[in-house]
Image (cartoon, rainbow, N blue to C red):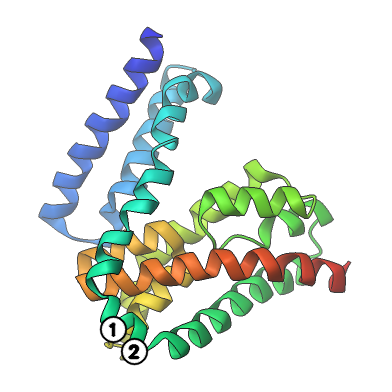
Amino acid sequence: MKSAIGFIFLTVVVYQAMKRVYARFNTPLFSPIVTTASIIVGVLLFLHLPYATYMEGGKWIGKLLGPAVVALAFPLYNQRETLMRLFIPIVQAVLAGVVMGIASGACLSLLFRVDKILLLSLLPKSVTSPVAMDIAKEINGIPSLAVVYVMIAGIFGALFGPALLRTLKITDPIGIGIALGCASHGIGTAKALEIGKEEAAISSIAMTLSAVLAAFLCPLVVSVLL
């Protein structure tokens, strides 16, 4: 019990410290998610502690993921008029994003001839972790491995997504929100919240719709490819 509380305290303290660093330097390389995870991994390696030991406390932080996702309904409610007015275009864009997310994972897996189990775990990489785990389990992938892919997609999207969107001259809040929500789920939505409230609202609905659509499309893709 003491070790669990200790790891919770360590994670919170490190994250708060890295938020201050990120606020000061404001560069993607100092994103709190990346720096906090790196420091925690370094601590575990230095102390020769297994991941299971850390998760005695870390699992309780993980359980907050559900309420955090639900909390995204607040900016969604504030932008409800915009969402209702553009509902059809948003659904169409999210569907395109989900298809590209699944297709990119499938194509890269087939191109590099990865094992079937890796392919099945990679398909739901662009949806939020709880849903990705359920999808991976349903299509006979490895849920824990799916979470790794989800985190990689989320972190890379949050790190490089805004710069890529600026390079492509995509400045519309709806386009930014859909791109970050579809590609980087919860982490992307947190990044969208840094950009603006409208971007965060669109990103949250994109993340939600992505999870629903991926739950239907992933099994369909598996049945076609395998």
Would you say 203 lies left or right of 126 here?
left
- The amino acid at mark 1 is Thr
Gap in Å between the C-alphas at discs 2 and 1? 5 Å
Q: Residues within 10 Å of mark 1 (few under 14, many from 20)?
A: some
- The amino acid at mark 2 is Arg
* Spot occupied by residue 168 in the image (x, y as percentages of width and height): 36, 89
- Which quarter of the rendered picture does the N terminus lie within? top left
Would you say 167 lies left or right of 20 here?
right
Point 25% across, 65% down: residue: 75
Residue 5, quarter of the rendered image: top left
Residue position marked by numbered label 2 in the rendering: 85
Would you say 181 lies left or right of 74 here?
right
Tell which residue pokes out farthest to the left in this image: 24
Tell which residue pokes out farthest to the top in this image: 2
Q: Secondary structure at mark 1?
A: helix
Point 41% across, 77% down: residue: 178
Closest to the observer, 113 or 223: 223
Q: Are marks 2 and 1 in contact (CB under 8 Å)?
A: yes
Residue position marked by numbered label 1 in the rendering: 82
* Spot occupied by residue 12 in the image (x, y as percentages of width and height): 26, 31
Q: Residues within 10 Å of mark 2 (few under 14, many from 20)?
A: few
- Which quarter of the rendered picture does the C terminus lie within? bottom right
Closest to the observer, 94 or 45: 94
Q: Secondary structure at mark 2?
A: helix
Residue 190, quarter of the rendered image: bottom left
Q: Is residue 60 above or below residue 147?
A: above
Point 32% across, 88% down: residue: 170
Closest to the observer, 29 or 138: 138
